[in-house]
Image (cartoon, grey):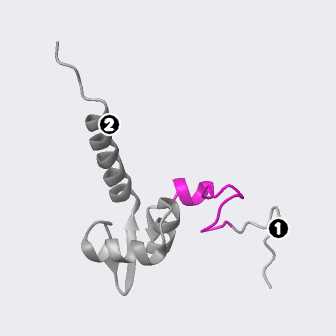
Amino acid sequence: MRDQGIGSGVEPTVGGDSEGRPDQQLADDRLTWTVPEAARLLGISKDCAYDAARRGDLPVRFIGRRVVVPRTALLRLLDEAHAQVDSTHHPTKAY
């Protein structure tokens, strides 16, 4: 059994606190996430994330048999979606 106590050097790859916030390492350090990890970050089910990947709504890359979600592509997608919501709710006023 692995010791995962304080100072053990074992970094969590998926998880979060009791409020559902992701671990800092998962949120900041990794270049890619698995589909289940991306689902957890997005607050959707794993099945919903795989369906979105099949539709092309969730950006994925294949590395061998592995399916990963590039961090930059997911963040760019979310930024674009956020910008669209902002422009429909708070249109820029032309003077």
Quarter residue 93 falls in: top left
The secondary structure that most of the magenta stretch takes on is loop
Residue at image coords 41%, 59%: 71
> Can residue 86 be found in the magenta stretch?
no
Residue 30 horizontal/vertical position (percent): 49, 61
Q: Tell me, for residue 74, which label it has, or none.
A: none
Q: Residue at x 41, y 73 (%)?
A: 48
The residue lying toward the viewer, choosing from 60 and 87, is: 87
Please give the residue where the numbered disc 2 appears in the rendered image. Answer: 86
Magenta segment:
11-29
* Secondary structure found at label 1: loop
Amino acid type at image mark 2: Asp
Q: Check disc 2: other Cα within 10 Å, few if <14, some if 14-19, many if 20+.
A: few
**Is residue 26 located in the magenta-colored stretch of the structure?**
yes
Return the x and y of residue 94 as percentages of the image width and height.
Answer: 17, 18
Q: Quadrant of the C terminus?
A: top left
- Secondary structure of the residue carrying tag 2 is helix
Q: Amino acid at mark 1?
A: Gly
Q: Residue at x 53, y 66 (%)?
A: 40
Where is the N terminus found, in terms of image quarters?
bottom right
Residue 2, horizontal then vertical, whole percent: 78, 80
Between discs 1 and 2, the one toward the N terminus: 1
- Image-based side of 16 in relation to 64, left or right: right
Q: CA distance from mark 1 to mark 2?
A: 43 Å
Residue ID at (24%, 25%): 92
Query: Residue 68, how many percent across, how many down?
Result: 39, 73
Q: Residues within 10 Å of mark 1 (few under 14, many from 20)?
A: few
Which residue position holds label 1? 5
Which residue is situated farthest in the left direction here? 95
Above/below status of 95 relative to 39: above
Question: Mark 1 or 2, which is nearer the eye?
Answer: 2
Quarter residue 64 falls in: bottom left
